[in-house]
Image: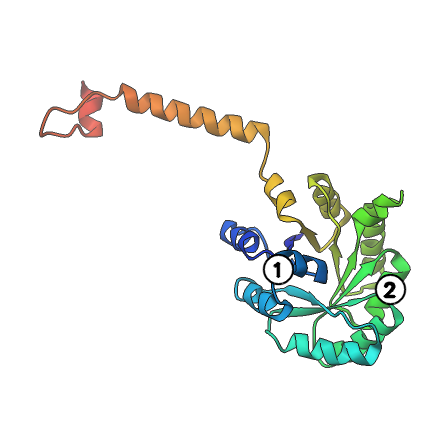
Amino acid sequence: MKLFLDTAEYDEIKAGVEWGVIDGVTTNPTLIAKAGQDHETQVKRICGLIGNVSAECVSEKRDDMIVEGRRIAAWHKNVIVKVPLTPDGLGAAKILAGEGIRINVTLCFSVNQALLAAAVGAYIVSPFAGRLDDINEDGMRVVADIVSAYRQQEIKTKVLAASIRNPMHVTQAALAGADIGTMPFAVLKMLFNHPLTEAGQKKFLEDYRKTQEARPAAPAGKPVTPEAATKR
């Protein structure tokens, strides 16, 4: 499962890229607003850091989304155009996908909706696990069911587990067979954490420092080689 960041904050994305663990970014109008940047400007900056950057249409009507989707796709070759899972959104997606534009159909909450996204040639479908949990449904079960349906039907659309809230969601998405999991920067940082890793690293460094302190001092002007230290 590839890991994406769900953010529009440039510094967060830069850190994830430098760690070498992320393969893409998902943005939406809310995240762009939080970053305090112009939509086009920020998406282009992010595309300069990494590929697979989802940028969302804000139009509501099919024809308007087609025009907007073409404009967004022209911003950068790394852009994936996001459209909502509505009749107008899917109508626009069909046209845009037919023109070779990669489409991420967002706000998916069921297997049937995911089948509709696949039918119009979506590159990615984004089921929102956390939001389903919020209404007392099993979000990751829906992700797993979409993956299962796609595999049985040999559908190539990628399943992106969205609305990930915690590290357990990441594990569940991977076990469910999701192709991609997108998460906030805070969740990505938590994936590194384990008390045994921290304790082990601390012990290794403490032991190393002890060996350095125990080494014999070199005579002035003549460094002690490892072989000479062994003979003493």
Q: Amino acid at mark 1?
A: Gly
Q: Residue 80: x and y, percent?
A: 67, 69
The residue at 56%/27% (across/down) is 196
Foreground pick, 68 / 17: 68
Q: Residue 64: x and y, percent?
A: 79, 79
Count of marks placed on residues: 2
Q: Amino acid at mark 2?
A: Leu
Q: Secondary structure at mark 1?
A: loop
Foreground pick, 71 / 206: 71
Q: Which residue is mark 1?
A: 36
Q: CA distance from mark 1 to mark 2?
A: 35 Å
* Disc 2 residue crowd, few under 14, some 14–19, many 20+, Cα 10 Å: some
Foreground pick, 28 / 229: 28
Whether residue 38 is visible: yes
Q: Residue 13: x and y, percent?
A: 56, 55
- 217 left or right, relative to 170: left
Q: Which residue is mark 2?
A: 115
Q: Residue 1: x and y, percent?
A: 67, 52
> Which callout, 1 or 2, points at the residue further toward the start of the chain?
1
Whether residue 26 is visible: no
